[in-house]
Amino acid sequence: MALLLLGVKSSKDGRAGLQNGYWGPKIIVWFGFIVLTFLIPESFFQVWGRYLAFIGAMLFVLLGLILLVDLAHTYAEYCLEKIENYDSKAWRVLLIGSTLGMYTASFAMTILMYIFFAGGGCSMNQAAITVNLTVLLIISFVSIHPVIQESNPKAGLAQSAMVAIYCTYLTMSAVSMEPDDKNCNPLIRARGARTATVVIGAIVTMLTIAYTTTRAATQGFALGSSSSHAYAKLGDEEVEHGMVDQQPLSARREMRAEALRAAVEAGSLPASALDDDDDDSDDGKDAKDDERGGTQYNYSLFHIIFLLATCWVATLLTQSIDDIEMSGDFAPVGRTYWASWVKIVSAWVCYVIYGWSLIAPVVLPDRFG
């Protein structure tokens, strides 16, 4: 699908129907692929998930971290914009309250990890928890440093809090889903919590994948889409009055038609130009089509991102699966040292990405000025 839809810029392209239509045939093909998977040897999925899909899985994890950092900045800047424009007490309370709440939750999870998962002989857990706490404090200090504030006044603890709670969650998820061969995971030994942790772990994993995939696949900044809305920006000379600075595409088409008629009457263009314009503006398609002027997202990258998501799921389900763990009623999702280390390292990478988003305007002022 990614290859078939490559280069589609608007719904005027005949291939756009492959994305937005033909649902009956696509569902039939989908069911056909599901049936086909039962005929493929299990060894293929082991090789695919452990080796071939590994690169795509790592790209998907990296994409999720970038989106998290972008979400942190977007959330804080949106709240600040509301506070500055409307002097809203509600938005101020929301921003301050959410920041304090996320920091409180981060420190609470850290304390719980030290109590239950960092006992004697659990050096891996002790190191992961300590590193996360240390970097959390460092990144919080950096976000309010005067040098950072001078280059980016909107940076602050709100963004750091969101990154901190996510990375602390990743660390807690890592230590709580690792094998219990060193008696470092009491959740596995607790009978009542065993099934619950397996089910909750699977649900959280799939929800995280669904959110990351959906948001990444429809975000214009991530997909390089230049038409995230059906409006056209007016020129600088038209917005000096400080009023509305966007113009519906329907108004643009009317202005274009008037300009063409004037050009034809003046003899600058042949009369056939009006016929061509009519073909472009109305070719029999639904008048409610909001992608006539440009697609809302990049169709090809939409499918590529979903491919990366399936690579992550395949790798997660096939990396170092313990046969003993699979003998029960539930097969744990991600209960391996490999999955634990992926989460721990992902938290560190997330801190690095966020740290760079703070430092970059200082190091590269010409690019971010």
Image (tube, rainbow, N blue to C red):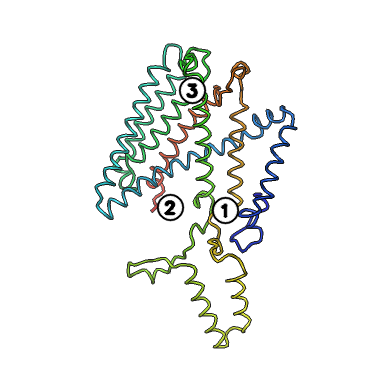
Tell me the kind of residue under disc 1: Asn
Disc 1 designates what residue? 298
**Helix, strand or loop status at disc 2:** helix
Residue 369 position within the rendered picture, expressed as x and y whole percent measured from the top left: 38, 54
- Relative placement, left or right, of 72 versus 6 is left
Count of numbered marks: 3
Give the residue drawn at x 55%, y 39%.
60
Q: Is residue 167 above or below residue 28?
A: above
Disc 2 designates what residue? 367
Mark 2 burial class by Cα count in 10 Å: few <14, some 14-19, many 20+: few
- Image quadrant of residue 339? top right
Q: Earlier in the sequence, mark 1 or mark 3?
A: 3
Tell whether label 2 touches label 1 (CB within 8 Å).
no
Residue 360 position within the rendered picture, expressed as x and y whole percent measured from the top left: 41, 45
Tell me the kind of residue under disc 3: Ala
The Cα–Cα distance between marks 1 and 3, rounded to whole angstroms, is 39 Å
Residue 183 position within the rendered picture, expressed as x and y whole percent measured from the top left: 48, 12
Q: Which of marks 3 and 2 is nearer the N terminus?
A: 3
Give the residue drawn at x 49%, y 71%.
252
State which mark lies toward you, 3 or 2: 3
State which mark lies toward you, 1 or 2: 1
Disc 3 designates what residue? 196
